Amino acid sequence: MKKYIITILLFLIILTNIFGQRTAFYDAFYLKSIVEANGAFKISAELNPIFQYYFNPGFTDRQLDSAIQANPFLDEYYQTAGIQSIPSGLSLPGIVSSIGGLNVTDFADGLARFLVERSKEELNVAFFRKFQEYFKSYPEVKIIML
């Protein structure tokens, strides 16, 4: 009985190792289907994990792009227009954060501080108005408070 249990457990462990790992065959098959549909491929959100698995999981998009271009087997299937078209001196967060020469983060911080201060004032005014109405509607509270 122990032999059967151990054999079954060993078989299950082998199956999980076989089907749980990424295989190069299925990745190549998937890339082939993309190449047949589009003629070439770019680094995208769906392809990024595949390439990072084979090159280096810590690569950024630019490093991954240069690693793919250096590979002679992938060079003819790879389109470089996506990442290379953005000049390296420009960064999108830098452009967005300084629209028209204004620092957007300072503007947002100032606006948030103003809204918080204004809402505190409004809450104070609303509280004291309700408090006055409460005193007017219940005159015995004035006696208790004195």
Image (cartoon, rainbow, N blue to C red):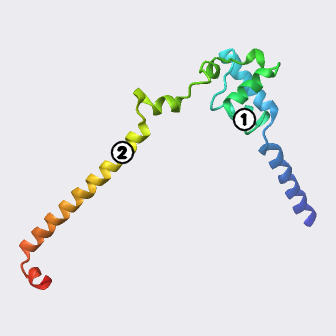
Alpha-carbon neighbours of circle 2 within 10 Å: few (<14), some, or many (≥20)?
few
Left or right side of 101 for 122: left
In the image, residue 22 above or below residue 28: below
Per the image, the residue denoted by label 1 is: 59
Instruction: Describe the element under mark 1 as helix, strand or loop.
Output: loop
Q: Depth check: give the residue in front, 6 or 79.
A: 79
Tag 1 and tag 2, C-beta contact below 8 Å: no
Instruction: Indicate the amino acid at tag 1.
Output: Phe
Instruction: Indicate the amino acid at tag 2.
Output: Gly
Q: Residue at x 64, y 17 (%)?
A: 81
Q: Quadrant of residue 144?
A: bottom left
Per the image, the residue denoted by label 2 is: 110
Q: Residue at x 11, y 69 (%)?
A: 132
Q: Is residue 54 visible?
A: yes
Q: Depth check: give the residue in front, 30 or 118.
A: 118
Which residue, as the protein is rendered here, is positioned at the far right? Answer: 3
Give the quadrant of the N terminus.
bottom right
Work out whether mark 1 precedes mark 2 in sequence or the reverse, and give the earlier one.
1
In the image, residue 52 above or below residue 89: below
Give the quadrant of the C terminus.
bottom left
User: What percent of the width, then of the height, locates residue 127?
Assistant: 19, 65
Alpha-carbon neighbours of circle 1 within 10 Å: few (<14), some, or many (≥20)?
some
User: What percent of the width, then of the height, locates residue 128?
Assistant: 16, 66
The circle drawn on residue 28 is: none
Left or right side of 59 for 44: left
